[in-house]
Amino acid sequence: MSRMGDVLAGFHAAWEFDSDSVLIRFERGIRTPKLFQALGERRIPHEALKAVTLTPGKRGTVVLHAVPRPGADPLMEAAAGQLKDGCDPYRLVLPAERETLAEYYADELRPLLGRDTHSEDFLVAGPEGPLHFKAYDGKASFDGKSVAYRWFWTGASSAKWKAGDQTFQVSELSGVEWRSPELFDGYLRLLRRGAGEAQPAQADQDPAAVVFGLGYGPVHESLPFAAAVLSAVRSCGPAVLDAAPAAAPGRRDPADIADRIRHLGELHQAGLLTDEEFSAKKAELLAEL
């Protein structure tokens, strides 16, 4: 760029143009999409972009759109084309009177864009952990090395309660599947290496998935979460995957164990668990003390 550090401010975000990247800083406010607020800021290397466009917007605006290359950004890979225009972090909406200035920056940026070369790694950094969010049937947590699911009494299916709380090491995963919470049956599913068709088709029956549920709306924390997990999976090379040891389980809160045994008893009394299943799950929980 001819002037490093120049800033172009629009609605909900400002772009700072540097010699090797564009730093996108998202505003915090009532009108700012919650996804943008969750992202905070993102640095996009020029090589991660394949095109820049400037088009008329709605109600006296113009839209500067930096188009990412496929496979360059874990956030967009996880989104898989499900984001609406208003939640696209690569779109900067500006007042129409700034069109000339926006065109100037677009012209400056175009010669610096990356070529269509294959890369094994993401070019845009994934969101940093630790991350967590609450879905309809459980709470998901990610510490950079493993994903943990803790099921909620009010939402989790009996299949998930039978399976118990789950922890997945990054080395066990091949990717993620994110279905937008704005859809009726949105969910986040972890794809396990070698599982294939063994994973249940329905997310509410799959211990490797949390469902968002009706009334939870756009769970804006879930997409950065999915992107962070996907980025960690991609950076976990074959050698690491073969050698990675399973993490030792930590000690659980005795009060939490008691609550879960009590709930297992309720499932048992309701006929959702057999005597053998109840005894086995109770023994597993007691062993965690």
Image (cartoon, rainbow, N blue to C red):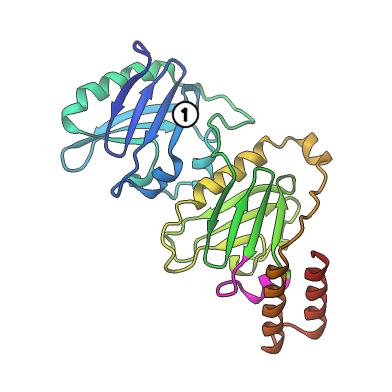
Which residue is pictured at 67% across the width and 70% down the height?
160
Labels in figure, total = 1
Q: Answer with the quarter of the image where residue 38 lies.
A: top left
Depicted 168 relative to depicted 269: above or below: above
Depicted 49 relative to depicted 162: above or below: above
Kind of residue indicated by mark 1:
Arg
The N terminus, quarter of image: top left
Look at the image and say whether residue 87 sits in the magenta stretch. Answer: no
Q: Is residue 249 left or right of residue 272?
A: right
Q: Position of residue 102 (x, y in %)?
A: 26, 25
Q: Is residue 9 left or right of residue 183?
A: left
Q: Position of residue 104 (x, y in %)?
A: 27, 18
Classify mark 1: helix, strand or loop.
strand
Q: Answer with the quarter of the image where residue 205 lies.
A: bottom right
Which residue is pictured at 45% across the width and 46% down the height?
81
Q: Position of residue 9 (x, y in %)?
A: 28, 29
Q: Is residue 286 left or right of residue 20?
A: right
Question: Mark 1 — residue?
Answer: 43
Q: Is residue 41 left or right of residue 102?
A: right
Look at the image and say whether residue 158 sits in the magenta stretch. Answer: yes
The C terminus, quarter of image: bottom right
Q: Position of residue 173 (x, y in %)?
A: 70, 48
Depicted 212 relative to depicted 154: above or below: above
Q: Residue furthest top?
A: 2
Circle 1 packing at 10 Å, graded few (<14), some (14-19), many (20+), is some
The stretch in magenta equals: 151-162
